Image: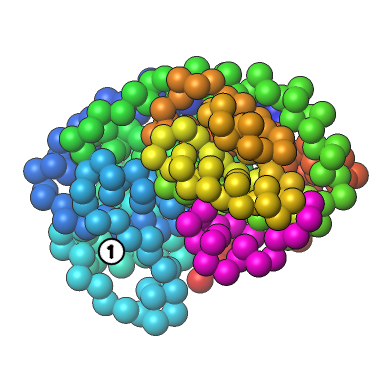
Amino acid sequence: MLQEIAEQPEVLRRTIAAERGKVTKLGDFLRQKDIDVIVLVARGSSDNAALFGRYLLEVTTGIPVSLSAPSVFTLYNAKMKLKRALVIGVSQSGEGDDINLVLERAKEAGAFTLGITNEADSTMAKIADETLLIHAGREKSVAATKTYTGQMLHFYMLASAIGDQRLDFHKIPDFADQALELQPKVKHLVERYAFMENCVVVGRGMNYGNSYELALKLMETCYVIAERFSSADFFHGPLAIVERRFPVILFAPAGSTRQSSVDLLNRLHELHADCLTITNDAKISELSSRSLTMPGDIDEFLSPIPFIIPAQLFAAYLSEAKGLDPDAPRSLAKVTKTL
């Protein structure tokens, strides 16, 4: 897991170099099709990447985006009207049975289908009308890291190709390099959380998907019960679970979501919670019990990939601090097939 976390800047660079031209042509094609809805279908970490993709695509393209519920197709055999839809399947292996069935049904319903996967010879790549590849090499760790950020990168490139807003995604690999510089600090920090059994992970907007992803990583590698919320939703009831020293982890970049992070941190301070933030904002860092501080020049829109990297490191090192093996989580396999 640690090795694959460290590979991410180079994976991102390779993926941009290999796929950028294809994504540009795809964007020109999709603009002509007059797509009026985008549907994303995924499971696990890929679903968390899709949650990020939903926010990014809606904000940058103005096209409504839906996260598909595969059971609508696989269990209830619903017939969807998708003639002006773009349906995107997201899977590191490309072998999720339910994801691929949704793509097949979507094609039958008239949708244009797109696959985002790490495996060029996968079933997904054979089904989808077009495939965008993550050039990550084989991912051996059960806990996805480099394929998760590779999937997110494809949403950046796709949003730039079909929307009216150009995103400086070419800067992200360098930001990822800078995120890896926090590795010694993260390794030291996790000792404080070695006995953590429960926590809450909070993110909003572009980093909402990251709150789901870190919670998943903590559950699968550290066996920590981790709930995840947006900072807005956390005030609507879940705040009641917080007591003295209760751990709350926040993705809190400077930008549109900054004030909601500040408001939440002020309330958590009154409750004497233990607040760990991943941030690039001096005020947020000051309000936090502890912080992992990123460079201030990372725009909020570009923050999700560099911000998840210290979180991945946190999960990997916390697993080790608990005497566990992050590369061999109990009861799990790399490829999970469900219908």
Residue at the far bottom: name it. 76
Determine the residue located farthest toward the front in the rendered image: 270
Residue placed under numbered mark 1 in the picture: 106
Magenta stretch encompasses residue 242: yes
Which of 221 and 3 lies nearest the eye of the viewer?
221
Q: Residue at x 22, y 44 (%)?
A: 61
On whether residue 140 falls in the magenta region, the answer is no
Residue 270 relative to residue 177: left or right: right
The tally of labels here is 1
Is 267 located above or below residue 105 in the figure? above
Which residue is painted at 55% across and 60% down in the image? Answer: 234
Q: Write the residue at 21% across / 48% down.
A: 62
User: x, y percentage for residue 71?
Assistant: 44, 74
Mark 1 closeness class: few <14, some 14–19, many ≥20 residues within 10 Å: many
Q: Position of residue 281 (x, y in %)?
A: 53, 29
The image shows residue 284 at horizontal and vertical percentages of 57, 35
Whether residue 247 appears in this view of the structure is no
What segment is highlighted magenta in the picture? 227-245
- Residue 77, located in which quarter of the rendered image? bottom left
4 horizontally vs 301: left or right = right
Name the colour scheme.
Answer: rainbow
**Residue 112 image offset from top left, x and y in percent:** 22, 54
Side of 291 relative to 66 (left or right): right
Q: Is residue 115 left or right of residue 4?
A: left
Q: Nearer the viewer, residue 165 or 111?
A: 165
User: What kind of residue is marked 1?
Assistant: Ala
For numbered disc 1, what is the local secondary structure?
helix
> In the rendered image, which quarter is residue 21 located in?
top left
| Vertical arrangement, residue 164 with respect to residue 112, above or below | above
- Residue 269 visible here: yes
- Residue at the spot x=63%, y=37% of the render? 287
